[in-house]
Amino acid sequence: RELSRWTEGAIADGMPILGVCWGHQLLAQVLGGTVKGGSYELGYVQVEQETDDPIWTDIPNPFTVFATHSDHVVELPSDATLLASNETGVQAFRHRQVYAVQFHPEYDLRTAEAMIHSKDLPESDLQAALDTCTENNVAAAQPVKQIFPNFLRHVTATAGAPSAR
């Protein structure tokens, strides 16, 4: 609750925010969206961009990312723009100066494999996720790391602009 209150204040103050995974879910809830538990999305997956946005600069469409979550944004906040999705639902959205992505752009192969091994899931589910940890998928996920500098570049370019608030 304390983090939710702080986040509400930061949003109200116009602070640019980029939420990743649980941060994606928290931002959706704070902004009035709905998050529900569901099936696990674990491993390297494909995501489709739904609309053009500065966050996608130099990122292919569709793109590959690592995902690890069982909670899903099932209803976007009002006035939010769906930025990306796949068969499990919302993968990225934007609400004014707030961006949120469900996947992990920052993961490398070692981190992905460690995350998979840390899950208390049936062995067949773990093996299916480990099977996505290929050299090709890891390489395909590299461009998505560009989200971080894209976000910073966009924030810098729009600082103080009415459309950024």
Image (cartoon, rainbow, N blue to C red):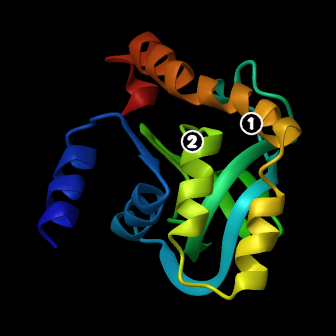
When asked about the image quadrant of residue 90, the answer is bottom right
Earlier in the chain: of badge 2 and badge 1, it is 2
Left or right, 31 with respect to 149, comes to left
Three-letter amino acid code of the residue under disc 1 = Ala
- How crowded is the residue under tag 1: few (<14 C-alpha within 10 Å), some, or many (20+)? many
The residue depicted at 67 percent of the width and 51 percent of the height is 66
Query: Mark 2 highlights which residue?
Result: 107
The image position of residue 24, as x and y in percent, is 47, 57
Mark 2 and 1 residues: CB-CB less than 8 Å, in contact?
yes
How far apart are the two marked residues, 2 and 1, measured between alpha carbons? 9 Å
Front residue (pair 95, 140): 140
67 above or below 15? below
The image position of residue 44, as x and y in percent, is 76, 53
Query: Mark 1 highlights which residue?
Result: 141
- SS of the residue under disc 2: loop
Three-letter amino acid code of the residue under disc 2 = Tyr
